Image (cartoon, rainbow, N blue to C red):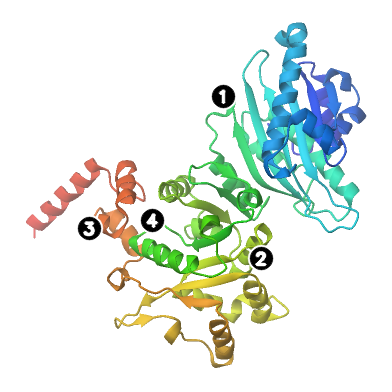
Amino acid sequence: MYEKNLGTKQKALRINLDRRIYGSFAEIGAGQETAAYFFKAGGASGTVAKTMSAYDMTFSDAIYGTEEGGRYVVESRLMKMLNREYNLVEKRLSEKRGEDSQFFAFANTVVALNFQKTNESHGWIGLQFQLTPMGPTNYVVIHVRMRDDENILQQQALGIIGVNLMYGCFFYYKSPEILLLSLMDDLTTDRIEIDMVRFSGPDFSRVDNRLMSLRLVKNGFTDAALFGSDGGVLQPSEALYKKHILMMRGRLRPITNVHIDLISNGTKQFLAEPDVDESKVVLISELTLHNLKAGDRDIDEKDFLDRVDILCSLGHMVMISNHHEYYKLVSFLSRLTKLKAGLLLGSPSLQDIFEEKHYEFLPGGILESFATLFSRKVKLFIYPTLQPDGSVYSCENFVVPDHLRPLFQYLIINDKIEDIRNYNKERMHITTDFVLEKIKRGEPGWEELVPENVAKIIKEKSLFGLPSEDNYADTVTQIHQAVGNL
């Protein structure tokens, strides 16, 4: 049961008084704030076998080894810390108290705010632990960004979330959703952001980390979460470090041949840019919370996973975000990489970007949003659409209010917006809604409107409301009977 009003000190004391929970703490970069809570709560001898901080890089490397690229605040360093400290606990204490103890190793590696307040404050925090004496080990790993503007406040927040992680793993493990919620007890998103979480181990074998990523965004713990083409969760700033990001946004329910044409031709043009290194380009399909919702209904988690499975099968990274406005998305991407990025859009999305009503809450209106959207190393690649009269709507005949026409021309001339060329006009009539309706009705021919492997997955799993073979046969029979009765 979730004890929402339980304070940090109470959590630490409850763990201390549980004689089964026993292990070590290793914290680097901001003091030993989590361990300190357990000492201050009282009864720490019942929980703490060892606490340490290999703050000096030479000491740290001597204990845990070196990291590729020389970075210390990375997941690989955290995992080395956890594994080494946990193995030491088991090696030194198994014989003495292994049959009665649930061993753990808590670790974090963080970079807190420096004296000049010029750095990015973030960190990796994790727990390796047993839920039964002599049992298997599990892991819960998170990545956080600290938002307090004072070093001491960041240290305090790290201590709180560390205790929350410990308490959640031992007392809320049966409900990972509650465990996730409890991580922010006694904290707010103004103080700390959780942009990645990973559950692993035998006791979490049924946890889908993609759903946990979705809940991070839904709960407001972060504005974006990322996972790779293998479905594994990724930390955005680590996965996209020194990468060119090429991103397509849409409902993608399902992805169609038009999307494939957009991606193929848009990618070719992006790779042809003089300041783009092909070896560093990553393609991301983005699903916003808005695009995951069906009207006023909440997000259908199965539908979400279905879309993700299909995108991953095409080799895409997938991002879930709450950045509905494009300028906010670009601001987020510019925090992840300094290299050039590209956005693949349809012309209706470009039309939407030029709607001034979206920026009425900004003091500088559309100019303020465009200052963010186009001041970074970003370029928009626009896929034309087919008009009802059969003509093609593109940047060449783009309709924009007269007072914004000079702004649009400025962006075209300065190579911030470009039409996607060599498009397949024969495919342009295909829309996601059109394909989705054909799938739901089980109408023949929808398979030709999506990539072959996508059609295969939809059929095998009866996705997006596709009637099963039995239901489809019944439907055909009913149609024939109805026709016969006419």
Q: Earlier in the sequence, mark 2 or mark 3?
A: 2
Instruction: Inspect this view and state whether residue 287 appears.
Output: yes
Name the residue carrying label 2.
331
At a point 61% along the width and 49% down the height, the residue shown is 239
Question: Residue 156 is drawn in which quadrant?
Answer: top right
Classify mark 2: residues with Cα within 10 Å, few (<14), some (14-19) or many (20+).
some
* Mark sitting on residue 445: 3
Q: Which residue is mark 1?
A: 202
Secondary structure under tag 3 reads loop
* Quarter in which the C terminus is drawn: bottom left
Task: Tell me the kind of residue under disc 3.
Answer: Gly
Q: Nearer the viewer, mark 2 or mark 3?
A: 2
* Residue at 66%, 57% in the rendered image: 336
Q: Are marks 2 and 3 in contact (CB under 8 Å)?
A: no
Mark pair 2, 4: CA separation = 28 Å
Rounded to the nearest angstrom, the CA distance separating label 2 from label 1 is 39 Å
| Quarter of the N terminus within the rendering | top right
